[in-house]
Amino acid sequence: MARKIPALKPRELIRLLLAAGCTFYREGKGDHRLYSRVVADRKRIVPIDMGVGELSPLYVLRILRQFGFSDEEIEIFFR
């Protein structure tokens, strides 16, 4: 399992996701933005809360899992 995932600001997480092949999908309700990624011919759309100061490591891991990133890919992100 991926270890040592830091707490990230929403913009830092978005920068990481864009570098990994995710794309902006649309603005959501309130402070949310939706990003998408195609995995195994399926589009995965995940909301990210832009209104918080910092996202907890557990929340960051949950978002990466929803996008379908493997443990190996997650470990590469945070080396």
Image: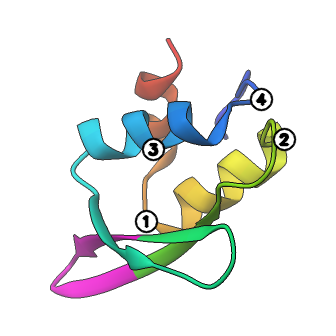
**Magenta stretch: helix, strand or loop mostly:** strand
Percent from the top left, x then y, of residue 35?
A: 39, 68
Secondary structure beneath dot 1 equals: loop
Along the line of sight, the residue nearer the viewer: 72 or 15: 15
Label 3: how many residues lie within 10 Å, few (<14), some (14-19) or many (20+)? some
Mark seen at residue 56: 2
Label 4: how many residues lie within 10 Å, few (<14), some (14-19) or many (20+)? some
Number of marks in the rendered image: 4
Give the side of residue 15 with respect to residue 53, left or right.
left
Give the side of residue 5 with respect to residue 72, left or right.
right
Let me know if residue 73 appears in the view.
no
Q: CA distance from mark 1 to mark 2?
A: 19 Å
Asked if the residue under mark 2 is in contact with the one under mark 1, i.e. CB atoms within 8 Å, the reply is no
The stretch in magenta equals: 35-44
Percent from the top left, x then y, of residue 53?
A: 81, 37
Q: Earlier in the sequence, mark 3 or mark 1?
A: 3
Q: Earlier in the sequence, mark 3 or mark 4?
A: 4
Q: Is 10 within the magenta?
A: no
Quadrant of the snapshot with the N terminus? top right
Looking at this rendering, what residue extends furthest in the front direction? 30
Secondary structure beneath dot 4 equals: loop
Asked if the residue under mark 4 is in contact with the one under mark 1, i.e. CB atoms within 8 Å, the reply is no
Percent from the top left, x then y, of residue 46?
A: 51, 74
